[in-house]
Amino acid sequence: GEILQRVGYATAHYGKWHLSGGGPGQHGYDEHDGDTSNKDAAPFKDPNPVDIFGITERASTFMEKNTREGRPFFMQLSHHALHYPENARQTTLAAYRQRTTKSRQVVRGAITEDLDSGFGLLLKKIDELGISDRTYVVYMSDNGGGGGGRDRPLRGGKGSLWEGGIRVPLIVRGPGVKANSFCHVPVVGYDLFPTFCELAGAKEALPPGLEGGSLAGLLRNAEAGEIRRPRQGLVFHFPHYQGTEGPHSAIRVGNHKLIRFYETGQVRLFDLGKDLGEKHDLAKELPDKTAELIVLLDEHLTVLNAQMPTPNPTYDPNRKPVAQKGARSRGKERKRR
């Protein structure tokens, strides 16, 4: 938001905000909902479940105002929908109860349809304002599903670096983007910041050493485009205890993906081009490729001064676990901290 403000953009953020260091107003957003979280959406019921349509209305008003004033704008909508609490319109719920008796599927399906309806209203407003020929719309999720088999054929889910946790949709509509086209080039969430800056004409304002590269070339040329990043590969780093995997990191270069688990020191290698479900570990079969990716991963984390888990000197694998205040029990005392 700050960089786009400097080049004359009006900026807005609506929905949940999970960053530290203050709310959106302290990070370059002119209009926003404040320092919100998922629980802030709980009071919103039918006809505006979890504020889906309230967010849409505020976004539409923001676009109308800045289009009328002839000012370019950047807007981010971070919906509460599909997180707890789960609320949907009663008419949508009724329609899904006609399709299945499984309550979980009814609620999830209804919320997804309501969210889709809200997004459709936003696209319609862009068309009505006559700005679709100069407006990029980017739709993506922040992580995979909650696991429990719902991400098949992908392995794992939210809280892990298996494909089920990090492979998400990325859909773009805008000038130069061919309708119904598909691009196979792997990209990552941290590519979006340099992308938006280039599209807005603010590329020169990017801070040095920035992760990621602009997707503008892919948007205009699909498979023929390229992304220039400061370092090779897509890196994912999760040095925490949340979910079931413990601290772990992953790197993808081409179709090869390596995952390293810090508690056990285990590394696993997969060829996603042939094994998207990550069932066949190739680490022992391809030791040179494994070693190459470990070096690249270590270099990346070192350059970024990434937070790393450290061994727990008092770790006792035979000790009965004791739940700590504010922390989840893992079944065993933590080997790293």
Image (tube, helix red, strand yellow):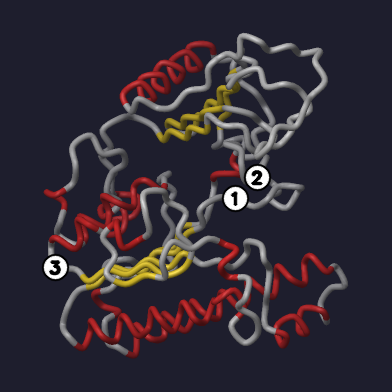
Which label number is shown at residue 157? Answer: 2
Q: Is residue 126 left or right of residue 336?
A: left
User: In the image, 332: left or right of 40?
Assistant: right
Decide which of tag 3 and tag 1 comes sooner along the chain. 3
Q: Name the quarter where the N terminus is drawn.
A: bottom left
User: On the rendered structure, is 225 left or right of 337?
Assistant: left
For mark 3, give the secondary structure.
loop
Could you tell me which residue is drawn at 34 percent across and 55 percent down? 222
**Residue 130 rendering spot, x and y as whole percentages:** 27, 87
On-image quarter of the C terminus: top right
Q: Residue beneath label 1, please?
A: 144
Q: Nearer the viewer, mark 3 or mark 1?
A: 3
Q: Are marks 3 and 2 in contact (CB under 8 Å)?
A: no
Q: Earlier in the sequence, mark 3 or mark 2?
A: 3
* Cβ atoms at labels 2 and 1 below 8 Å apart: yes
The amino acid type, in three-letter code, at marker 2 is: Gly
Q: Are there few (<14), some (14-19), or many (20+) residues within 10 Å of tag 2?
A: many
Q: Nearer the viewer, residue 1 or 206?
A: 1
Which three-letter amino acid code belongs to the residue tagged 1?
Gly
Q: Which residue is mark 3?
A: 8
Residue closest to the eye, 65 or 196: 65
